[in-house]
Image: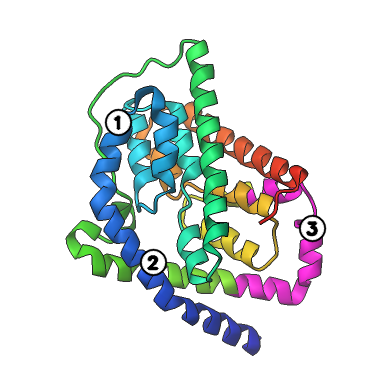
Amino acid sequence: MLDIIKDTFIDAIKLLPFLFITYLIMEYIEHKMGKKSKNIIKKSGKFGPLLGSILGIFPQCGFSVSATNLYAGRVITLGTLIAVYLSTSDEMLPIFISESVSPIIILKILGIKLIIGIIAGILIDLVINLFNRNKLNKQEDEIGHICEEEHCHCDENGIFKSAVFHTVNIFLFIIIVTFIINIVVYFVGEEQIASWILNRPIVGPMISSLIGLIPNCAASVIITNMYLGNVISLGSMISGLLTGAGVGLAVLFKTNNKLKENISIVALMYIIGVVSGILIELIGITL
């Protein structure tokens, strides 16, 4: 147990400088692009899923929350919202960068999520339009920034303090998640866990997609660390990252007063995540 605790802290501490630098860059992008991204997606029209997916892959702190509020105000389509949710990677990017994962691999993973987001978003809007249910009621929206959800007051604190806040926040998550994973791997065995999930093209994506639906950055931390630890496959990781929209889903239930619709959106996200992961496993895509 002492070795597990020691290894957990050593591995986590090594990530600190990389996490901070990554979040510093992300905060800069967020402050520079936040309002621009919102305006672009509001004016996207039929190109909503395409632009939503592209903007979603950029490391912007609260874009999924902004998209959620825009959808609640019927400013954007359901397809655009789903495209944003699917392409958003939450904490995957900083963890991959801090773990020195190859930039080529990172770009390929982001590319997979981008393509799935675009295709799913366009198909959803086409189906809705086919049944004449896509009657958008244009009205002014109020964007609830993710930083307000986390009470970090990023706009007030500035880029540096915000980066410190997010670094400490995710650092603690990494310690907890890594510690739990290490304990499970130690007592159960990596080969045993892999036999449950890694080589099962259906079970793995189903479990990962469920984890991804957790409306918190912990979901992407868990999934990314499990992939880096060779506990889950690429398909399972993609499944979880597709459904992981950060606190976007939590804000959806808070701002959109149509409960059945919200549940349908969550179910749709889950189905897309599972099916995408299974297809990746069956096709045999590897990185």
Task: Tell which circle, 3 or 2, labels the residue nearer the N-terminal end.
Answer: 2
Q: Amino acid at mark 2?
A: Thr
Q: Which mark is residue 206?
A: none
Location of mark 2 (residue): 22
Task: Tell which circle, 2 or 1, labels the residue nearer the N-terminal end.
Answer: 2
Q: Amino acid at mark 3?
A: Trp
Left or right for 183, reference 221: right
Query: Which is in the foreground here, disc 3 or disc 2?
Result: 2
Left or right for 82, reference 145: right
- Category of crowding for the residue at label 3, using alpha-carbon neighbours closer than 10 angstroms: few (below 14), some (14–19), many (at least 20): few
Q: Is residue 176 above or below residue 154?
A: below
Location of mark 1 (residue): 42
Q: Residue furthest left?
A: 156
What whole-number distance in Å separates the C-alpha atoms at marks 2 and 1? Answer: 28 Å
- Tell me where residue 23 appears, x and y as whole percent: 36, 65
What whole-number distance in Å separates the C-alpha atoms at marks 1 and 3? Answer: 44 Å
Task: Tell which circle, 1 or 3, labels the residue nearer the N-terminal end.
Answer: 1
- Category of crowding for the residue at label 2, using alpha-carbon neighbours closer than 10 angstroms: few (below 14), some (14–19), many (at least 20): many
Which type of secondary structure does the marked residue at label 3 adopt?
A: helix
Q: Give the colouring mode of the picture.
A: rainbow
Location of mark 3 (residue): 196
180 drawn magenta: yes
Of 143 and 163, which appears nearest the observer? 163
Which residues, given as a range, are shown in magenta? 179-208
- Tell me where residue 169 appears, x and y as whole percent: 40, 68
Tell me which residue sits at (31%, 71%) in the image. 164
Left or right for 54, reference 27: right
Q: Quadrant of residue 278?
A: top right
187 drawn magenta: yes
Q: Quadrant of residue 223?
A: bottom right
